[in-house]
Amino acid sequence: MVGNNYFTLKSIVVDVDTLASLDGVLWLRSGAIASKRLGQHQSTISRNINRCEAIFGINASKNNGEWHLKGDASLLNLERVVHQRHRWLGGRSLRIEAVHWSAKTYLDPTPEGWLPGNHDLLNVQQPLKLLRDNILDAWIGAYPDVPDQDDPDFASFPLLRHPLSLVVGENHPLLAVGSGLTFELVSQYPSLALPDGAFPQLEDCLKRIGLWNSPSKISRYNRDRWEGRWHSELLVGYASIFSIKFYPQPQYILPLQLPLIVGDNLVVKRDFENHPRLLKLLADLRHRLNPWLKAHPDLIGFGGEADRG
């Protein structure tokens, strides 16, 4: 099918760098960032976007900090299929994203042959759309808000499972409660929350116990607008051993076990679930967890490449 698409479109096909300019800006939100990441001048990126708009009959515009396309993108999406196949065949670096609290663990340094994103997406919808549109090649998503094992479009490989803790600042009144602490008491205080539907399974679990009640409007990670809201000594947050370091002040774990397990999954389109480059990446990411697994017995890792979940 890909070959047929290529030969059907070869008379108007755009080169790899031209389409990378458009998709790089859609993905990374910024011409300046795309310029550095792709190794293109910003003026080249602007010209390439204009060329894509003319060829594919679409219009790119920015609204509330995000780039969007207007027009019929069906021809553009066919072209993206060809370019993504080209990347997987080794023609260009593959593109990978992660939630901010996982990026340091898995993508520093970035695995060979992969191009990192901003690691600032604070919802499940945007990265899945980027994957579905063949702009992004892989995403390290936050379990449980990842595609199901039997999802027809995406393959989801487990990397890690671990508990999530409630945390507060050193002067929080809940620290004085001790063994009598309950979720009912915690729910009387403001707790961090993202916009409705950002991570629906996490949101549902926390709302059922009275948490997730102080929403923020951010859709991209910004330390000042998330952990930086810690100007209130009454705020309750959530943290793991990976994310607690992002808070601006020392945090203390409350003695309550949240009724959920969180973690990370590597997500790709079904077409590439058995690709050698995907399996190599999966082995690399799991290998990077070994020091954490040895130091923290409450972490659960996954060693088999065939694991799903």
Image (cartoon, helix red, strand yellow):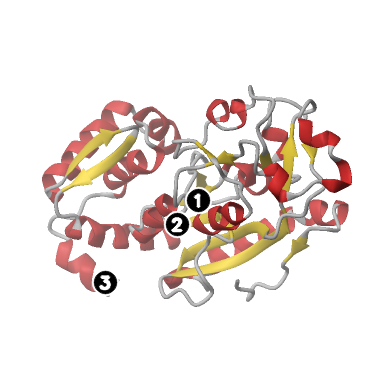
Q: Residue at x 51, y 53 (%)?
A: 199
Q: What residue is shown with label 3?
A: 3
C-alpha gap between disc 3 and disc 2: 19 Å
Residue 218's label in the rendered image is none
Which quarter of the image is occupied by the N terminus? bottom left
Q: Residue at x 16, y 43 (%)?
A: 53
Mark 3: secondary structure: helix
Could you tell me if the residues under marks 3 and 2 are in contact, i.e. CB atoms within 8 Å? no
Point out the tag, 2 or 1, that comes first from the N-terminus.
Answer: 1
Residue type at the position of mark 2: Asp
Could you tell me if the residues under marks 2 and 1 are in contact, i.e. CB atoms within 8 Å? yes
Q: What residue is shown with label 2?
A: 137
Specify few, some or many for label 1: CA neighbours under 10 Å numbering under 14, 14-19, or 20 or more: many
Q: What residue is shown with label 1?
A: 96
Q: Is residue 279 visible?
A: no
> Could you tell whether 12 is left or right of 136 in the image?
left
Between tags 3 and 1, which lies in front? 1
285 in relation to 156, above or below: above
Residue 299 placement (x, y as % from top left): 78, 58
Specify few, some or many for label 2: CA neighbours under 10 Å numbering under 14, 14-19, or 20 or more: many
Where residue 152 sits, quadrant-wise, is bottom left
Mark 2: secondary structure: loop
Q: Nearer the viewer, residue 244 or 77?
A: 244
User: Looking at this rendering, what residue extends furthest in the top direction?
Assistant: 231
> Could you tell whether 153 is left or right of 77 in the image?
right
Residue type at the position of mark 1: Ile
Between tags 3 and 2, which lies in front? 2
C-alpha gap between disc 3 and disc 1: 25 Å
Point out the tag, 3 or 2, that comes first from the N-terminus.
Answer: 3
217 in relation to 125, above or below: above
Point out the tag, 3 or 1, that comes first from the N-terminus.
Answer: 3
